[in-house]
Image: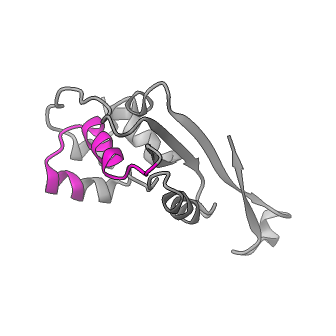
Amino acid sequence: MAKQNNPLAAIFERVSEPEPAMPEEVWRPYGVFMTPRSGSTWLAELMREAGLGFPNEWLNHARMDREIRERGYTSVKGYLRSVLAEHVGSSGASGIELPLLQVMHAYELEDIFSILGPSARYMFLRRENIGPVDEVDSQGGRSVIQD
């Protein structure tokens, strides 16, 4: 059962649709776990330009609410698989940014890792501060990508 403070629970209070298969054109799914201010927007643009899909914050509850109302999705799985197909790159890759709080909310409703499938690759993008936190300003960190 979803927690009351989960904004996605209200969006998907309807009966779930049958499980849609991963669209045929998405044969290289991936997820980018990220922390705030880590350069994920820049990374997403670089990946899109390189033909690797457009890994945006597709689990953002405001975006999902709007998309669900406009397109009539009834499950997280149906929504995400459709979005991945819509934003697949020329390489067959398509991905999603996975901020921790959004992952936790979505996972309460469905196993989002099974949505991407067993062949999915995951990357971890985090901000690595240089120096003590109280001495770091908004420009005082650097991003680190781990695979």
| Residue situated furthest right in the rendering | 131
Q: Which residues are magenta?
A: 66-90
Report the side of 73 relative to 8 (left or right).
left
Residue at horizontal 48 percent and vertical 59 percent from the top: 48
Q: Position of residue 11 (x, y in %)?
A: 22, 47
**Model colouring:** one colour
Q: Nearer the viewer, residue 92 or 46?
A: 92
Which quadrant is home to the N terminus? Answer: top left
Of residues 29 and 35, which is closer to you in this image?
A: 29
Q: Residue at x 40, y 42 (%)?
A: 105
Q: Is residue 99 magenta-colored?
A: no
- Pinpoint residue 136: horizontal percent, then vertical percent: 78, 71
Q: Answer with left or right where residue 142 lies relative to residue 63.
A: right
Q: Quadrant of the C terminus?
A: top right
Q: Position of residue 116 (x, y in %)?
A: 42, 33
Q: Is residue 83 left or right of residue 12?
A: right
One can see residue 40 in this view: yes
Residue 49, relative to residue 5: is it above or below? Answer: below
Give the answer, above or below, for where 120 lies relative to 127: above
